[in-house]
Image (spheres, rainbow, N blue to C red):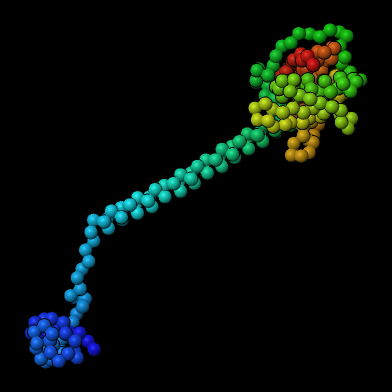
Amino acid sequence: MAVINCKECGGTVSTTANACPHCGANPSAFKDKPVNFKATEVKKKRGPMFYILAFIALSWVISFLNKGFESITSRGGESTSAAQKNTNETRQQSSASDGAVNQSQPSRVSTSGSVTSNAVTTASLSDDQMVRTCRAAISAIMSQPVNITFGMMRGGFAQVSYVRPMDGQQFDYQCKFSGDTVIWRGFIDRQWGRWRDGPHDSVVKFVVNGSIINIKEFYGASVAVDKDIEI
């Protein structure tokens, strides 16, 4: 069965009908012209609500995308900050381990008073004197307050540690003595580094006079550090 248009009135009628239900025309008036539903289909109109909902949906999508971009940017900034912080800490550790001193920095140099002639200047020190001297030397070289250092004898060496106040990071060193010279090494990457007695390393001299220990650090004939430390 099909639905067609009546030639007489234009109304729709079934091809099996005996007469047009609208005008009563015989079947010959409507059996040869099928209805074009696409042509007669009423176009649906989009009301104001459609555009309102579309605008809301678009605004939500834009807001979501902006938040995602801000999150990615924030994480990228945090990663950059973390990477920069790790780089700075690595440089600090390397500086502490290597004992590198820039001779052009007068701020590390301080002129101190002289010690008396009966001061201890040999390697024949007691364990307590070796620990105190190592603490004084590390304090002077690393520009850290001596009162934050602590030490002990371990494996025949004076071992000194301190926790850096600015970030809570711990640094560890060992000292050995030769005449009036302190030779030190740092602990980095979970192992002890080399002793700082190479041709390009500084020379650290000490003089013990009771509770006062004088520390001098030399680069060739230049004095980089000259400090009297009470400990």
Which quadrant holds residue 43?
Answer: bottom left
Question: How far from the left and from the top, in percent, is residue 146?
Answer: 75, 20
Question: How far from the left and from the top, in percent, is residue 94?
Answer: 70, 33
Question: How far from the left and from the top, in percent, is residue 231?
Answer: 79, 16
Q: Which of 158 and 182 is in front in this view?
A: 158
Question: How far from the left and from the top, in percent, is residue 128?
Answer: 87, 21
Q: Is residue 72 left or right of residue 210?
A: left
Locate the N terminus by quadrant: bottom left
At a point 73% along the width and 23% down the height, the residue shown is 148
At a point 65% along the width and 34% down the height, the residue shown is 89
Q: Nearer the viewer, residue 56 or 127?
A: 56
At a point 71% along the width and 11% down the height, the residue shown is 111
At a point 17% along the width and 90% down the height, the residue shown is 17
Q: Is residue 26 above or below residue 11?
A: below
- Tally the marks: 0
Q: Is residue 130 visible?
A: yes
Which quadrant holds residue 160?
Answer: top right
Q: Which of 35 and 162 is in front in this view?
A: 35
Q: In this view, does 154 lie above or below 65?
A: above
Q: In this view, does 131 lie to the left or right of 58?
A: right
Which quadrant holds residue 131?
Answer: top right
Q: Can residue 34 be seen in this view?
A: no
